[in-house]
Amino acid sequence: MIWILSVWLVFADVSQPLTKVWQHATFETRADCNEYIAENKVKIIDSILEQFRNYEGNLLENFDFFCENIPLGPEV
């Protein structure tokens, strides 16, 4: 299992939030992911606003980001 940084995006006039996976880095532990967030919060926020402020014609209303674990593949 690895940890990734996911971004939860809420757009005006859209019924469901959109979740995007942050592909810039993966982490071996949740602590590593949280440390990355703590050290890079401004850079992460700037990038979210640059990429998603107006996404496919929808205006970004709110967002949050968090560490999420995902399986690498089938367990052997």
Image (cartoon, rainbow, N blue to C red):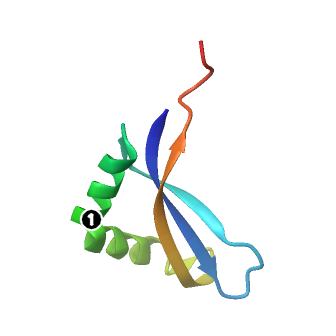
Q: Is residue 53 left or right of residue 33?
A: right
Taking 52 as reference, is 21 above or below it?
Answer: above
Q: Position of residue 37 (x, y in %)?
A: 31, 62
Left or right: 25, with 69 as reference point: left
Picture residue at 44% right of the left edge, 43% below the top: 3
Classify 59 as above or below 3.
below
Crowding near pointer 1: few (<14 within 10 Å), some, many (20+)? few
For badge 1, the amino acid type reads Ala
| Residue at the spot 52% in from the left edge and 77% down from the top edge | 63
Q: Is residue 3 left or right of residue 20?
A: left
Q: Quadrant of the C terminus?
A: top right
Q: Position of residue 67 (x, y in %)?
A: 45, 55
Q: Which residue is mark 1?
A: 38
Pick the front one: 46 or 34? 34
Please tell me whether residue 61 is drawn above or below residue 7 in the rendered image.
below
Q: Which one is nearer the viewer's eye here, 76 or 61?
A: 76
Residue 55 position, x and y percent, is 57, 75
Locate residue 45: give its quadrant.
bottom left
Q: Judge from the rendering whether residue 67 lies leftward or rightward of residue 33; answer left or right.
A: right
Rendered residue at 35%/51% (across/down): 33
